[in-house]
Image (cartoon, coloured by chain):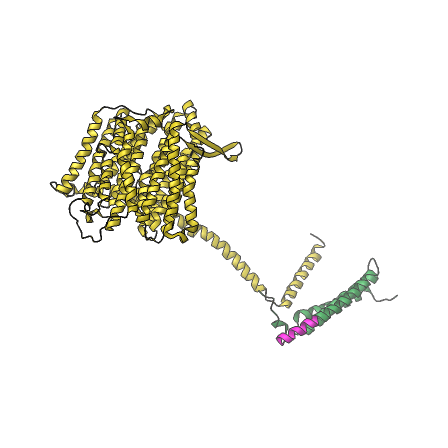
Chain colours: A yellow, B green
């Protein structure tokens, strides 16, 4: 495990190579990216395998010395980090392969791969960080990678705005994280996770300070993971190329917020209020985003809202002290959501539209994509035997056992919505007849099918490493040797599993009745409750609300400041310049070039001096 | 030795200086201006010699200074005339009003 620091360096190398030689390599850039991420993946898997038998490895050296203060940098391989390494490098590797088909023919193909390398580097660096400062550095780098990739089609106005929005919205959260970090440093004198946890355990930090810092760190996670109220950037981020949506905005970066809360979990666990905040925000986001997802018409936006909603689930799990449940769902979600996004990309690749109203009847035409999409949909809907079922069940159990029954029922309702809108999406895209004439619909190339197939297998199989039926291997392993993280498995009543199954099946049934059998009119909601429909369709007018308040507020302030700038500051500067200019002009007029005039003036001056001298009779 | 008072020497020097100054500041012909400057130099020389003879501390220094001034005035006249000729070759004029290249 001593060589774990090499893992992030491979993608960095890929980034550098493609930056320098990308122009010459053209589409061969893909191979450089794929091979180097494969190296990362191989090492990550090795690290994970090694971590099963060996204890946590941590290596650090002094990075900066400021006065008496020593800042360290290094890396740590604990259970969570090892797991994250594999998830990130695996999804990144698959996305690298997939992009070869998806981005084929793009003019800036090598640039795309270079950005992918940069992002993967940052994300792997983030999960290896042993202290908050290093985490923060990579945290920002990840944001940069996301910004570059969302704005990849920067000549499109909407993509440009989406990139800026994503950057600014996540920055708002980052400020919270930064303040929390500084407060923690002030209180404990260290950025190191274990030292912070140790002083929290000793009680060296006051109760309110723990709550405050935990909530501030959570604000950072809210920004990155698209939780309410900073979620609005994530659906807009779908302007980026679809492989990017799969990698960054489904599997890895947005999960960084959840990861951060998980990595600082002992801090949260020490404060009931902080846990409460996390679970309430998580549960609210889960249901809130799910309800928006019901009426969206863009295939990627539906998936984006489902991502927001699922991230809310993970937060709910963590907030309900379900450390294992949250991390477990993070893993399964990474697999099935990446699968869904890649499959959606394959659909978009085939039909050249993102509007699900225009699709339909693709089941027969896309022989591989359609079943894989179905696997992903079943997994996210929580249908038994798929991975999402087990992880969602863990979360529901955690929410129930932790005591807040209202949050539990919110989560159940969100699960119903999830099953409904995911199958609405599935039926509208794949079932029935084509709603518009589509020519040249063709299955995607093998380079795109292969990653989906791998993720499809994982979307089914990854659930079985932590089940109440066969054993909670993942859970037991995750909390091994660290009592602060809670139990590996929380026993809950058996009926929760039955309720979860019933709820997801009824969601699917409802979608089936509306969109396939058509025994319930599609316009039911629109005709019965046009107001509700409009509110949902317009995403609760959150964007408009921000536009009216924060954007206008900022504009008003900037207008006021501009007024001061133009009239006060510039006026002052202008006065000074005009004065100096006039003085200079007058002076230059005296400079006539007539030596005789100069002589005369000199003489008159001398005469005046002499008169003064004579009158005063000596030196003054 | 002589009954000419010191003030007469000084008055002569003053008159000579004023004439020179007047010429240097008012004449339009550059050659005349140069000549006027020579007058002013000579006025200074008279002053130097006067004070070296009748000053409160008579010594030979003043007369040596005067000799130096004459030598330098000769060199200055030679250079001044040379510049003037070069200027005339270039600009076909000796009118001092037109020689205002030094202005901004």
**Placement of the N terminus of chain A among the 4 image quadrants:** top left
Residue A579 image point, x, y percent = 51, 56
Span highlighted in magenta in the image: B80-92
Q: Using the image, determine if residue B75 lies above or below residue A59.
A: below
Quadrant of residue A123 within the rendered picture? top left
- For the question of whether residue A345 can be seen, the reply is yes
The secondary structure that dominates the magenta segment is helix
How many marks on residues? 0
Q: Residue at x 32, y 30 (%)?
A: A318
Answer whether residue A24 is magenta in the image. no
Q: Residue at x 11, y 40 (%)?
A: A519
Residue A438 image point, x, y percent = 20, 52
Residue B80 image point, x, y percent = 70, 70
Q: Using the image, determine if residue A529 lies above or below residue B42.
A: above
Quadrant of residue A288 within the rendered picture? top left
Task: Pick the residue in front: B30 or A180.
Answer: A180
Among all residues in the image, which is located at the extreme right? B1
- For the question of whether residue B94 can be seen, the reply is no
Q: Using the image, determine if residue A534 lies above or below residue B2.
A: above
Answer whether residue B86 is magenta in the image. yes
Task: Pick the residue in front: A445 or B76.
Answer: A445
Among all residues in the image, which is located at the extreme bottom? B92
Quadrant of residue B37 within the rendered picture? bottom right
Residue A423 is left or right of residue B20, and the answer is left
Task: Pick the residue in front: A162 or A503.
Answer: A503
Residue A188 image point, x, y percent = 45, 28
């Amino acid at each position: 495990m001593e060589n774990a620091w090499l893992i992030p360096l491979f993608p960095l190398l890929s980034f550098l190579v493609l930056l320098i030689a990308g122009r010459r390599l053209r589409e061969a850039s893909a191979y450089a990216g794929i091979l180097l991420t494969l190296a990362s993946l191989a090492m990550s898997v090795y690290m994970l395998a090694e971590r099963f038998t060996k204890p946590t490895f941590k290596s650090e050296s002094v990075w900066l010395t400021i006065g008496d203060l020593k800042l360290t940098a290094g890396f740590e391989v604990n259970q969570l980090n090892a797991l994250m390494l594999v998830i990130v490098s695996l999804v990144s590797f698959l996305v690298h392969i997939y992009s070869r088909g998806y981005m084929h023919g793009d003019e800036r193909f090598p640039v795309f791969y270079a950005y992918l390398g940069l992002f993967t580097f940052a994300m792997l660096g983030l999960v290896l960080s042993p202290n908050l400062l290093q985490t923060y550095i990579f945290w920002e780098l990840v944001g940069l990678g996301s910004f570059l990739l969302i704005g990849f089609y920067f000549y499109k106005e909407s993509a440009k705005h989406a990139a800026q929005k994503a950057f600014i919205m996540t920055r708002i959260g980052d400020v919270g994280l930064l303040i929390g970090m500084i407060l923690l440093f002030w209180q404990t004198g260290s950025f190191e996770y274990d030292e912070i946890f140790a002083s929290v355990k000793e009680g060296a930090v006051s109760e309110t300070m723990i709550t405050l810092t935990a909530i501030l760190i959570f604000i950072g996670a809210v920004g990155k993971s698209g939780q309410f109220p900073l979620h609005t950037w994530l659906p807009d981020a779908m302007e980026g190329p679809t492989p990017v949506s799969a990698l960054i905005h489904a599997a890895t970066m947005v999960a960084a917020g959840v990861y951060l809360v998980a990595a600082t979990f002992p801090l949260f666990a020490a404060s009931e209020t902080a846990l409460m905040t996390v679970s309430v925000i998580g549960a609210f986001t889960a249901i809130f985003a799910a309800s928006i997802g019901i009426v969206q018409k863009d295939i990627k936006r539906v998936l984006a809202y489902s991502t927001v909603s699922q991230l809310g689930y993970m937060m709910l799990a963590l907030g309900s002290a379900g450390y294992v449940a949250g991390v477990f769902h993070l893993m399964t979600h990474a697999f099935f959501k990446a699968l869904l996004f890649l499959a959606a990309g394959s659909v978009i690749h085939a039909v050249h539209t993102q509007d699900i109203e225009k699709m339909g009847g693709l089941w027969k035409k896309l022989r591989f994509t359609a079943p894989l999409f179905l696997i992903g949909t079943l997994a996210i809907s929580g249908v038994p035997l798929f991975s999402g079922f087990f992880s969602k069940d863990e979360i529901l159990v955690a929410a129930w056992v932790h005591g807040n029954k209202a949050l539990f029922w919110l989560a159940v309702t969100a699960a119903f919505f999830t099953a409904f809108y995911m199958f609405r999406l599935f039926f509208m895209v794949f079932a029935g007849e084509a709603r518009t004439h589509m020519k040249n619909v063709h299955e995607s190339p093998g380079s795109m099918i292969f990653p989906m197939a791998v993720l499809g297998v994982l979307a089914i199989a990854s659930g079985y490493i932590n089940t109440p039926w066969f054993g909670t291997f993942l859970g037991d392993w995750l909390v091994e040797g660290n009592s602060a993280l809670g139990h590996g498995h929380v026993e809950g009543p058996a009926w929760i599993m039955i309720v979860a199954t019933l709820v997801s099946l009824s969601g699917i049934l409802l979608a089936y009745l509306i969109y396939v059998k058509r025994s319930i009119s599609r316009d039911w909601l629109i005709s019965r409750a046009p107001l509700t429909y409009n509110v949902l369709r317009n995403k609760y007018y959150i964007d408009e609300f921000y536009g009216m308040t924060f954007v206008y507020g900022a504009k008003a302030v900037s207008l006021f400041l501009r007024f001061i700038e133009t009239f006060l500051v510039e006026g002052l500067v202008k006065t000074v310049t005009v004065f100096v200019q006039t003085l200079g002009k007058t002076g230059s007029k005296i400079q006539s070039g007539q030596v005789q005039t100069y002589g005369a003036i000199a003489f008159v001056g001398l005469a005046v001096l002499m008169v003064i001298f004579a009158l005063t009779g000596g030196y003054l | 030795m002589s009954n000419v008072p010191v003030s007469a020497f000084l008055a002569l020097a003053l008159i000579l200086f004023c004439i020179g100054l007047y010429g240097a500041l008012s004449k339009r012909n550059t050659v005349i201006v140069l000549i006027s400057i020579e007058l002013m130099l000579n006025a200074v020389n008279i002053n130097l010699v006067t004070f070296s003879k009748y000053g409160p501390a008579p010594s030979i220094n003043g007369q040596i200074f005067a000799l130096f001034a004459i030598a330098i005035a000769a060199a200055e006249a030679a250079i001044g005339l040379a510049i003037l000729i070069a200027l005339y070759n270039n600009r076909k004029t000796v009118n001092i009003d037109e020689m205002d290249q030094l202005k901004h």
